[in-house]
Amino acid sequence: MVTLNHYLILSAILFAIGTAGVFVRRNLITILLSIEIMLNAVNLTFVAFGRALGSADGQIIVFFVMTVAAAEAAVGLAIVISLFRHRESLNPDSFASLKW
Amino acid sequence: MNDIAFYLFGAFAIGASLLVIAQRNPIYSVLLLIGSFGALSGLYVLLDAPFVAVIQIIVYAGAIMVLFLFVVMLLNAPHEDTDYDARVHPLLRPGPMRFGAFLALVFAIELWWALARGRDTGAFPGGSVTSVSAIGKSLFTDYAFPFEVTSILILVAMVGAVVLARRDHPDRRERGGA
């Protein structure tokens, strides 16, 4: 029998994968993709809790999260493009001008 | 039947997500993430949220991921790895990367432990909101203000993306200043 706990554990694993991706990968686009994985893990939690509590609120929050994800992807990719024009690189280690 | 589907979709989502962060070529990462989103969409159907499942496919897999794919192909720089990156596996490197991987592992174990110790939540209750009209009614009454704020957010993101990605012409910069 699949319960709420199963969904929460699955969501935790997905969120942990996203966190690991942000730290492990050295590519700006893959880092943005890892953030998308994390956002989706949170979405799964919202829908699972909404189902367990029998309300539509969980599903509605998911729409707002998706909107934020779309805005984040648009702005983030615009930043990636303008960074790439400056350095011809997607490696975050090459953008260290502000590092002390 | 539902249990088998849950484990199938869950395993697919985890496997695809792991491969996303294991790939060196971002094009494969984007395509695998689309697969992961498809599996999540199946999970939403199992959770009696068919509208969210459809939106997940159309908006996430269809629009946002295509935007990513577009940028990956536009920049055409799939291999950013140096010799050092090729020689040493990311998980074995010193410093923040190893710390980050360790942090994620601790996080996963901690959450697993907390959920395993918590009381059993039991099966999902019978009543669930699946109709699109109920969701839409709630969205335009109880959540009307966040909904309108969202439209401003999208406007700001749109303007921001245009400003950031615009290429400055040298002659225009002379005339307009900054």
Image (tube, rainbow, N blue to C red):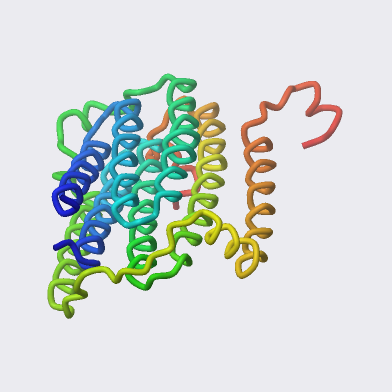
In the image shown, does B139 or B117 lie closer to the viewer?
Answer: B139
Q: Which residue does the image show at 19% across and 47% down from the upper left? A: B5
Q: Is residue B79 above or below residue B41?
A: above
Query: Where's residue B174, x and y in %?
Result: 82, 27
The number of callouts visible is 0
Left or right of residue B144, residue A29 in this image: left
- Taking the view exactly as shown, the residue that stands out farthest to the bottom is B119
The answer to which image quadrant residue B105 occupies is bottom left
In the depicted structure, whether residue A36 falls above or below residue B119? above
Where residue B128 sits in the image (x, y, percent)?
38, 65
**In the displayed structure image, the side of residue B138 where residue B114 appears, left or right:** left
Q: Is residue B160 left or right of residue A77?
A: right
Q: Residue at x 19, y 73 (%)?
A: B122
Residue B55's spot in the image, x, y percent?
Answer: 47, 44
Figure quadrant of the N terminus of chain A:
bottom left
Q: Quadrant of residue B165?
A: top right
**Residue at 51 percent of width and 36 percent of height:** A77
The residue at the far right in this view is B175
**Residue at 37% of width from left, 60% of height from top?**
A47
Q: Nearer the viewer, residue B95 or A40?
A: A40
